[in-house]
Amino acid sequence: MFGIKQQHENKLTYTRIIALGFMGMILFGGFLLSLPIATKSGDATPFLDALFTATSATCVTGLVIYDTYTHWSVFGQLVILVLIQIGGLGFMSIVTMASVFLGRRIGLSERKLLVQSTSIMELGGSVALLKRIVFATIIFETAGAILLATQFCPLFGFKTGIYFAIFHSVSAFCNAGIDILGGFGPFCSLAPFQNDPIIILTITALIIIGGIGFIVWDDIYHKKYHFRSYRLHTKLVIIMTGLLLIGGTILFLIFEYNHTLLGKPFLEKILSSFFMATTPRTAGFSVVDLNKMSNSSSLLTMLLMFIGGSPGSTAGGIKTTTFAALVMATVAASRHLPNVNVFKRRIENSIVRQATSIFSIYLFATLSATMLICAITPFGLKEVLLEVISAAGTVGLSAGITPHLNIVSKITILLLMYGGRVGILSLALVLAEKHQIAPVDRPTEKIILG
């Protein structure tokens, strides 16, 4: 009896398998990047720095210690690119598709694991949906690469231009924000192309499509443009994404009009503002120096990074639906309504509690990491907070302090990136998972709030 119970308790849950799978990919990627062949100089990269880079790539974050173009060789860059692609789709999606191509039957346990790793709502048709996801990914990334190649090929030559186009298309679609444009200057990101509408709009479109979520894709694919027929999830994602993009663009235009956008033509100001509203959710590309932005824009950037993209996508953050649930719950509570209702549907109280948990855990992790790094580094609160939220939201934007972090700070940021990709709530459940809860209904007692 004891042996059977012990075996049950030691059984890996789906959440643990996903967490361990990402950890395995990161460790393997870190090992490859620590090899001398991975650098242009031929020198081995310290393992912690290689592990940090592998974590950033696999967790599609974009924070880097070394400039990707000047430090890493083509081998190292390809390792980073593969990690980005696997991290964007999810390692279980890659494993499942490999099994499908090999003609192997996908069992029930693998289907359940696939559903949890990709945030698919239903078990039935999950493999068919995965095929559509992979096919759509190839289409979007290829289309993005073709558009980028029209600008990169005349500038860098055909072969290099194609390579640059593919790398940045995958990085943008997977919301990684890692670039190989260091030839214009280390850590320059997309600043050299801030006035190029084709590159900026292509990267922006890839970020939005990648961050909107696989479930939303599938809903739109089946129901076309009939908004009323969409799932409630899809409606909330589309509305929240639109509000954040439009609102963010307007606010950035106001805050930076006579600041970093000073002297630009009006249309270029709108283009840059739209890009600045898009990239914090959660790509990490930049067209302006974050240190030169106004305090209002910096705070807005942190807010957008904290919210992030949508569930079941390549993006991070607390997610748009979590933020929507919190806002709607707050409105319902202020109006003394018993339930949260939207689009003639009631949101379950368990969903609201989960949204509150996600928000609270992200906030606690962010504040704790910020206090720790501020205590052990000479950087200011604004720079550290931006770095920490960027890591937890798997964004990649930085005020330039990433290469100068000490060992403890690097490990802290590394853990935040990992938690942000796996899901900080899921990671908390893994660390404190209990299989049996005592069926005891405790006495009720009131406390005073507010």
Image: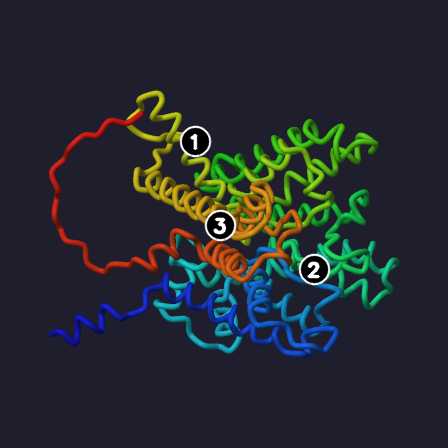
Per the rendering, the mark at residue 51 is none
Amino acid at pointer 1: Val
The residue under the point 37% across, 64% down is 16
* Number of residues whose C-alpha sits closer than 10 Å to that of mark 1, classed few (under 14), some (14–19) or many (20 or more): few
Mark 3 or mark 1, earlier in chain: 3
Q: Is residue 167 above or below residue 222?
A: below
**Is the C-beta separation of discs 2 and 3 under 8 Å?**
no
Examine the rendering and report whether any part of residue 43 can be seen. yes
Location of mark 1 (residue): 327
Determine the CA span between mark 1 and mark 2: 37 Å
Amino acid at pointer 2: Thr
The residue under the point 36% across, 63% down is 14
Q: Nearer the viewer, mark 3 or mark 1?
A: 1
Examine the rendering and report whether any part of residue 218 can be seen. no
Horizontal side of residue 388 vs 177, given as left or right: left
Per the rendering, the mark at residue 142 is 2
Q: Nearer the viewer, mark 1 or mark 2?
A: 1
Frontmost residue, 433 versus 200: 433
Horizontal side of residue 278 vs 371, given as left or right: right
SS at badge 2: helix
Q: Is residue 424 above or below residue 240?
A: below
SS at badge 3: helix
Q: Is residue 99 above or below residue 246?
A: below
Task: Name the spot of residue 402 as percent of width and height, x first.
Answer: 62, 55
Task: Name the spot of residue 132 as percent of width and height, x first.
Answer: 54, 59
Q: Is residue 48 above or below residue 445?
A: below
Task: Name the spot of residue 178 as percent of width and height, x first.
Answer: 66, 57
Horizontal side of residue 258 vs 307, given as left or right: right
Per the rendering, the mark at residue 215 is 3
Determine the CA span between mark 2 and mark 3: 21 Å
